[in-house]
Amino acid sequence: MKKVLFLCILPAVIAAAGFITTAEPGKEKKKTPGEAMFYQKLGNKTAACGLCPRRCMIPEGKRGFCRNRENRGGTLYSLTYGKPCTMGLEPIEKAPLYHFNPGHTRFVIAAAGCNLRCKYCQNWSISQKAVEEVPYQPASPEEVVALALKEKAYSICFTFTEPISYYEYMYDIAKLAREKGLKTAVVSNGYINPEPLKKLLTVIDAIKIDLKGFTEKFYNETCSAELEPVKKTIKLVKQRGKWLEIVNLIIPTLNDDPEDIKKMCEWIKKEAGPDVPVHFTRFGPAYLLTGIPPTPIKTLERAYDIAKKAGLNYVYVGNVPGHRHNSTSCPKCGKVVIKRIQFMVMENNVKKGKCGFCGAPISMWREKK
């Protein structure tokens, strides 16, 4: 079993390890924040952000919904550029990305902010905050990539908050990382406009989309967002040939209706294909939804059965340590080809993209030469 070193979650730990000079929360060397991408300058010094479907109209001196993009004199700036609140090493399975070079170590990074308001967010203390409300460590894209290389990570993964909200920083890191031979992955809510997404897909290898539910009601009332833009993102990622995995966190009474799950699985098969990995994960009380109990395991297993019946080949039950459906089985012979315990790969019997038992193809990300 491969040993994985967890470097840190808090910036203070990073500093203690000697990676980056300590900085006080909300303070750094004087540096003008970078100008944002994908916006228009309008009259009266108003800026129209085009990054996500909200298309915020931001008056001078104000910020957009994600808290990260501020209008200064008619120019929109990204306030989180070079200000990561989290960096460290973790298994790629924690993303979860189960078919993206299974078992490798990823270098994780996040900056404060999000363009959704999910009531159950487990990382609300950094995702639902502005940059000055969260301790961070100054780190340029060059420094981030150098650290990932030093720690011998296979990929850099943008996660924990919403990477779309710090798009410019993510893009520059990902572009440089690929030039240096590192792979790149994004863990996202998928709430992004097509043009920024197309540009981002030129510098990343894999993306995991949180498909939070399959009704507009759930997205509107629980996430302050809309479903359709996320569906468009999934379709575009697939069309562009990038590795895609989908996660659906099942919350009792809110998005666990079997008919909705069936419709979602049928849609996924039609628009993303039968081989896209789909993860049904267990909800735990968090943030503003502390009065709802954890998802019953039977509910997750029911969703698994619905997905398999709909024709999806790689379906998982997540956040249930030791569950049999946390491992990868061959769609043809049914034998376990990748055995996992929680986030650790214990055995891998996929040989050159094929089942080590019957020789059937196993859908996996392939490195492009």
Image (cartoon, rainbow, N blue to C red):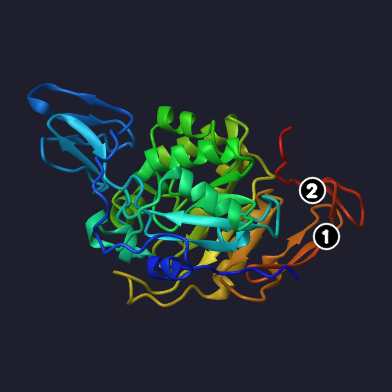
Residue 323 in the image: state x and y as whole percent: 66, 73
- The single residue placed furthest to the top in the displayed view is 43
Residue 173 x, y percent position in the rendering: 48, 42
Q: Residue furthest right?
A: 358
| Nearer-the-camera pick, 147 or 95 | 147
Disc 1, SS: loop
Q: Disc 1 marks which residue? A: 334
Residue 263 visible in the snapshot: no
In-front residue for pair 91/280: 91
Percent coordinates x, y for residue 167 in the rendering:
39, 40
Residue matched to label 2: 362
- Packing grade of label 1 (10 A; few <14, some 14-19, many >=20) is few
Q: Earlier in the sequence, mark 1 or mark 2?
A: 1
**Left or right for 202, reference 74:** right
The CA distance from mark 1 to mark 2 is 12 Å
At a point 30% along the width and 31% down the height, the residue shown is 50
Residue pictured at 42% horizontal, 27% vertical: 195
Q: Quadrant of the N terminus?
A: bottom right
